[in-house]
Amino acid sequence: MRMMSKAPALVALVLLLIVQVSMQYVQADDAYQFFNWNVTYINVALLGVTQRVIAINKQFPGPELDTTTNNNIIINVHNNLDEPLLFTWNGIQQRKSAWQDGVLGTNCPILPGKNWIYQFQAKDQIGTYFYYASTSLQRAAGAFGGIRIHNRIVIAVPFLPPADDYTVLIGDWYAKNHSSLRAILDGGGQLGAPDGVLINGRAAFGSFFSVQQGKTYRLRISNVGTGSTLNFRIQNHKLLLVETEGSYTQQVFYDSIDVHVGQSYSVLVTANQAPGDFYIVASSRFGLPVLNGIAVLHYSNSRAPASGPLPAGPAPGDVNFSFNQARSIKRNLTAGAARPNPQGTFHYGLINITRTLKFFNSAPVIYHKQRFAVNDISHINPDTPLALADAFNIPNIFHLNSIPDSPQGRSPALGISVINGAYRAFFEVIFQNNENKLQSWHMDGYSFFVVGYGPGTWTTTSRQTYNLLDAVSRSTTQVYPQSWTAVMLELDNPGMWNIRSQTLQRQYLGQELYLRVFNPEMPSITQKPPQNVLKCGKAF
């Protein structure tokens, strides 16, 4: 387990001076953590070939961001790549600080040879997340790492402290450099099946997790891959699910867990077997061939290598297994999270819905090239980020509600997709998947209640199946083939927020949109950029 090192004293002092002139974006009463990231390429042998990957401080995966609820995070990012760079913090809500989101609709990218300072607060959050580079398919080259947000010591945790706490980054991987993958998509092609699965950036048997017999460990599992659902399991060991993306869950034992791309889970594993080594497996679920990432759970007094067949997971393509497991994952209503009050005191099921959005994904060919769309619009990023255009009143960059609330049956087209959301509105969002491939969707700036899954096409009668009591709150949800997923959320976080497919090629080719949440009583929270804002396009 690697933790981030602090920046040198001089760098920390400079950062502190910068922070002091931007205090409206962070809370001065809480602790500060300073980090200095140097982003470069390194060559690493993976899956039998040497590839150029993106490293942070020469680490692949990148250093872990280890913090505590309400800490202020200051990260000075130096871009030493040969292409622009941004980081997004997958699941970190950045309350009242959308400018730190790190996507092309919010920020101008950090140009090669330049640096930029991210500053945000882990406000009222706990749990397991990850970060990654958000532009130009860079996630397919690495540039990702784990995020863990610990509870403040005054808040009780609904399980005993584990003997240790490990981050487990699983993900599918291509043996081509990301520049080659990007050229395929730019030429109108698709990426096809990945070449393997990595665990913590290593191929089979490259990662080891040491345990002591009789002790219990927390594993924070994140699927940082490009598009494949992965089933996670450990030979002869049960997984006790305790948390997912900031929601403490009802504690249920599983033999294995489906982790869809972009999702994070925490499980407890007790080393209750005879001393030995045991296979850890992350295998692809909904495509052929089945790819296995393999690591080792090593007992400290073991003298025997892992042996026997790999532990069996669900049948490849078995959607019913995943459906049923998803419905079994529920919120622990008796536990506090970032605050002392129980999580169940927010009665989302009793709030009147003010607007229903139905997002239908599709895969059209536009101008003779493969694209992906939402409600028949395939999003393209303008030269001027949407948030900058909004802040500086630059006309003709975007129009509010330029994407309809539901599909209108028009011909697919390229466009800039922005939905206007009234501050404090309560939204019901339906993700409809009429394709034969599982989809995964993420919303920046928010966690939402995943209230229902169902086969076929969503209708108003589908609401009768909703879980209106103890649904988990998270930022990434799966949508099964030929099925729908329903979520609910209150628009209480002003800003310009990205909603995107977590499947990398689908997002790169247009399957995303933006939600503008404006608070008219405090417009500066919505629109005022930080003093170190990067400018580009018409914002100069």
Image (cartoon, helix red, strand yellow):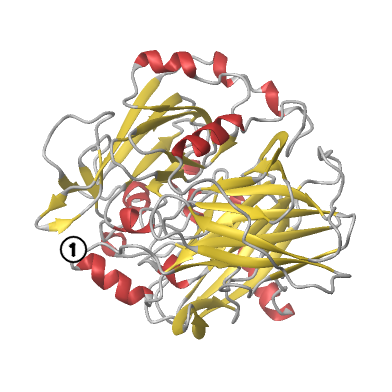
Q: Is residue 393 found left or right of 200 in the rendered image?
A: left
Quadrant for the N terminus in the image: bottom right
Q: Kindly identify the residue that appears in the image at 51 percent across and 39 percent down.
A: 322
Q: Kindly identify the residue that appears in the image at 59 percent across and 74 percent down.
A: 37
Q: Kindly identify the residue that appears in the image at 45 percent across and 39 percent down.
A: 319
User: Residue 287, percent across and down?
Assistant: 39, 54
Q: Tag 1: residue type?
A: Gly
Q: Residue furthest front?
A: 308
Location of residue 430 by image quarter: top left
User: Residue 495, percent across and down?
Assistant: 45, 43
Q: Please tell me whether residue 50 is drawn above or below residue 258 in the rendered image.
A: below
User: Residue 139, percent across and down?
Assistant: 45, 66
Q: Mark 1 Cα within 10 Å, few/some/many (few <14, many 20+)?
A: some
Quadrant for the C terminus in the image: bottom left
* Residue 121 in view here: no
Mark 1, secondary structure of its residue:
loop
Residue behind mark 1? 188
Between residues 265 and 112, which one lies in front from this camera angle?
265
